[in-house]
Image (spheres, helix red, strand yellow):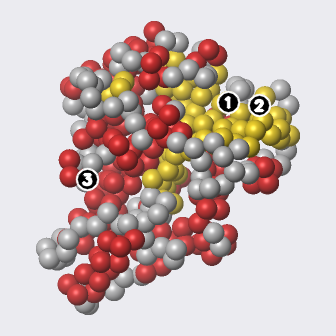
Amino acid sequence: MTILAGIDEAGFGPLLGPLVVSSCAFAVAPEHIEADLWQVLRRSVGKTRKQLRARLLIADSKKAYNRDEGLGHLERTVLAAIRSLGQAPASLSDLLKLVCPECQRRVMEYPWYRGAESRLLPSDRPELRIASGVFADDMTAARATLVGLSTYCVDVAYYNTLIERMKNKSHVLFFTTTRLLQDLMKRFADQNIHILIDRQGGRVHYREHLLRSFESMELQIVEENERRSAYVLRGGSRSMHLSFEVGADERRLPVSLASMVSKYVRELLMECMNAYFVSMSSDLKPTAGYWTDGLRFLEDLTRHLPDFQIDRDRFVRCR
């Protein structure tokens, strides 16, 4: 079996709230490395909402999530996937401990995220148990197993610290992605790994960044073009294949699932943040945190909570 993983983010552009980057790892038969996993697992998952029936929707989070409809498919898919790993987090706090234990303590220091302990998740619904079981059985029949979901949650204060050090938000995203790459290498130390990553901005060349992050490994450039940048990192008897692809979050199932995990974690944290402030003034309209609406929310805070003191370095991104 070979490890096939996907990495994607949610929250790269907003003014408020965390940047969340996640990895999703499968152990698959070698013939599935380049296969369309939506076809391989067609009994249990679908790529579009049409004719989905009882299957799980796995798609780029921008297509899987609609703010007007609520968490819906996003929550169902992520929690069913987690159940297939034998876990059923009862609250957002439990979810953070499970997928991003390194970040959980830092995130919970924010007063507006402390509601994570009381934000319950419907992990034990019968529908989720059934969907998770079908997903697990389908993977078994296809010689595939979901072996890990991990998240790195960059809270605003930490994000601003990284920006001050690196001077560039794209470098912050790559740094966070690298943490997940290193975690995958450490966890699957005795296996070869293929990792799919959505193209980060307009960047085509990743060689120098990878060499700095993996100094002990040799790097081979497979290709670098406008559609795909692919590399092989080798060290000792093992190798890591990396592919940065335009539209990977729509074309590669592990990347789509990572996108959904990232979006789910971020949306739950934004829910907590909004609930915290709205509890102090019902005149406040919740925000998704994106730039224009984030500025509107900051103005509303000043107007409706004039005496409230907030540390902007912990609340507002510097860029």
How far is the residue under mark 2 from the one under mark 1? 7 Å
Residue type at mark 1: give it.
Answer: Ile
Residue type at mark 2: give it.
Answer: Ser
User: Which quadrant would residue 173 be assigned to in this image?
Assistant: bottom right
- Please report the residue visible at 20 percent of the width from the left and 84 percent of the height from the top: 304
Asked if residue 109 can be seen in this view, the reply is no
Q: Position of residue 115 (x, y in %)?
A: 28, 60
When the figure is inspected, residue 254 is found, relative to residue 13, above or below; the finding is above
- Please report the residue visible at 47 percent of the width from the left and 16 percent of the height from the top: 40
Residue type at mark 3: give it.
Answer: Arg
Q: Earlier in the sequence, mark 2 or mark 3?
A: 3
When the figure is inspected, residue 231 is found, relative to residue 154, above or below; the finding is above
- Which residue is the site of mark 2? 239
Considering the numbered disc 2 on the image, is that residue within a helix, a strand or a loop?
Answer: strand
Mark 2 and mark 1 residues within 8 Å of each other at the beta carbon: yes
Q: Residue furthest top?
A: 141
Q: Earlier in the sequence, mark 1 or mark 3?
A: 3
Q: Quick one: 4 or 96, which is closer to the camera?
A: 4
- Which residue is the site of mark 3? 67
